[in-house]
Image: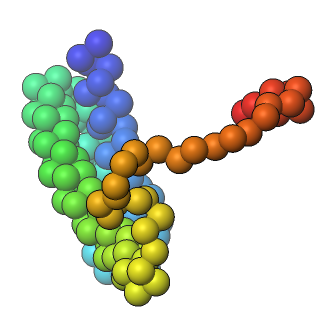
Amino acid sequence: MKREKNLETMLVITVGLLVFYYIFRTKSWANYLLLASLAVGLIGVFSDFLSEKITWAWTKFAQIIGNINAHVLLTIIFFVFLMPVAFLFKLTKKDNLKLKAQKGTVYEERDHQYVPADLENVW
């Protein structure tokens, strides 16, 4: 199982380098991507020790990038979407969530007589 995981990671890195080579093939440094892809592929096939080390480093790199990415995306979502909506609700002075202190119960009384049509398409 560990060998398969290492081979899978090495294959992903190799294919990624090849994709970058085909994207940047007109650049003068693009040949190094092709050589790096070949080297990573050969290491993955012939050296279990080195492929295990590369897999470990790749996994740690992915975790770090994932943490950074999550924080950046959540920050962008908060400031672009949630904060303007909160300001709009502040300007309208509505209390849709009924968060202001109320006397008595916070439940709404609803006098509704159920009919069979209410239960036909519940979801």
Asked if residue 37 shows in the view, the reply is yes
Is 114 or 81 nearer to us in this picture? 114
Q: Position of residue 12 (x, y in %)?
A: 37, 42
Tell me the residue at 41%/87% (across/down).
91
- The answer to whether residue 122 is left or right of residue 117 is left
- The answer to whether residue 121 is left or right of residue 86 is right
Residue 24 lies in what quarter of the image?
bottom left
Q: Position of residue 9 (x, y in %)?
A: 30, 35
Q: Residue furthest top?
A: 1
* Total marks in image: 0
- Against 29, residue 110 (above or below) is above
Q: Position of residue 59 (x, y in %)?
A: 19, 39
- Against 85, residue 100 (above or below) is above
Residue 121 lies in what quarter of the image?
top right
Q: Residue furthest right?
A: 117
Is 43 or 19 nearer to us in this picture? 19
Tell me the residue at 13%/43% (across/down).
60
- Against 119, residue 30 (above or below) is below
Is 76 or 65 nearer to us in this picture? 76
- The answer to whether residue 114 is left or right of residue 3 is right
Tell me the residue at 80%/31% (across/down).
114
Residue 95 lies in what quarter of the image?
bottom left
Q: Quadrant of the C terminus?
A: top right
Asked if residue 54 shows in the view, the reply is no
